[in-house]
Amino acid sequence: MSSPRDLDQRLDFLGFGPEDLAALRALRPVLERSADRLVGAFYEHLQSFDHTRALLTAPGVSERLLARQREYLLSLAEDPRAPDHAEERLRIGATHERVGLAPRWYLGAYALYYSLLVPLVCEAYPGDRAAAERALVALQKMLMLDAQLAMEAYIERDRRELEVRNRQLADEGRTLAREIEEQQVELRQTRRRARVAEELASVATLVAGLAHEIGTPMGVIQGHAELLEPAVTAEKDKWRVRTIREQIDRISRIIQAVLSSARPRELERAPVELAPLLANTISFLAEKFRRRGIRLETDFRPVPILVGDAEKIQQLVLNLLLNAVDAMPKGGEIRVVLAPGGDSEVEIRVADTGVGIEAQALDRIFEPFYTTKPAGQGSGLGLVVAHGIVLDHDGRIEVTSEPGVGTEFRVVLPIRPTGDARRNDME
């Protein structure tokens, strides 16, 4: 949280002084008269975009949003040095990150509010251009302060998650080293027992599974690092983010080169809200999509809360997205759809406009080590892991493909009673 000294420095840097506070307080009656109309216009704008509209589908979210946005508008006329002002803005930023609202959306919301307030202020000071300019400048400073605090909450949460991921990665690396040593001993024993071929086949299956299991969270960390890098301004911090990305690439190469055995994580069932999970998963690959020239289209329709393993489902979707990316070396389009399925089911569909899969290969794509990718570019285990996750959730996965046109994977998962379902919320 920001300290009073830190807040004073922020306001001094923005040039916020007594004249600005007086201008804002004079706007209080204007804001009170127009708050409902402004909030209504803001809500209507949110409904115009698929991503923000998807966050408003849960029961009660729209009502809470309208009430809190009205409170926020009126707070623009208050002293930013008041107790809890900065803490409230930081909490809003953390809430936005938690529900999957990317910075581009909530930073855009501040710009939208300013565009709505400009004509209102001009109407409030007819013939007094100087007073109108003072009020608009003060509003701009206040909105910039709020956007700054909300953005820093997002970055701080992201930084903590990166630290956790790094610690997990370090633990996995030590475990991998121990298992490699143990496997080397086991291989020497199998040679002495003249069962080399059988043992190597078994070990290969375990090894590739571990490599993929570790590779997925590393891909998540890499995605976060890529998203974090443009938001970091200090050169020292940029160097640290680049170092994280370089070391992740190095570990990925080591995992691909050194095979070892692993124990799969047990399934942990809990209520899962699929729309935020899908949006969060897609955000990990935003930079990869941009570099590959891939357009993304999403269609998230309201669905019930699913009972399942959120991390496993995220891994499932990530594997399908990465498979789609690999199928489009020259760019293309990925479409992700979330929709109700049959009786008490939900569907997740991932379609690409890539190279497609030959008919004779479709029956084998879920076999371990089978891949249509060139040598060295695929382990043949991504779809095997995805298929296993679907089966663990008592679901099914289907694929349709046409060479030269593209491929679509359709995942159908059953809905179970959740008991205490969690709700989406949006500040």
Image (cartoon, helix red, strand yellow):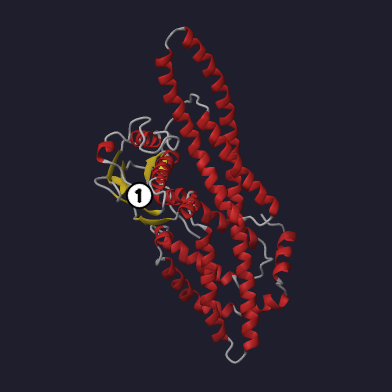
Taking the spot 64% from the left edge, 85% from the top edge, the residue there is 131
Label 1 CA crowd tier, 10 Å (few <14, some 14–19, many 20+): many
- Relative to 213, say whether 420 is above or below: below
Residue 25 visible, this angle: no
Rendering coords of residue 421 (x, y %): 40, 46
Camera-side residue of 203 and 127: 203
Rendering coords of residue 150 (x, y %): 59, 59
Quarter that holds the N terminus: bottom right
- Relative to 133, say whether 56 is above or below: above
Q: Label 1's element?
A: loop
Q: For the image shown, how many numbered marks are present on the structure?
A: 1
Image position of 248 (left or right of 335): right
**Which residue is at the far bottom?**
127
Residue 382: name its quadrant: top left
Residue 304 visible, this angle: yes
Taking the spot 41% from the left edge, 41% from the top edge, the residue there is 319
Residue receiving disc 1: 354
**Which residue is at the far top?**
193
**Which residue is at the far front?**
375
Which amino acid, mark 1?
Answer: Gly
Taking the spot 51% from the left edge, 43% from the top edge, the residue there is 220
Rendering coords of residue 206 (x, y %): 44, 25
Image position of 181 (left or right of 403): right
Camera-side residue of 325 and 389: 325
Rendering coords of residue 397 (x, y %): 30, 40
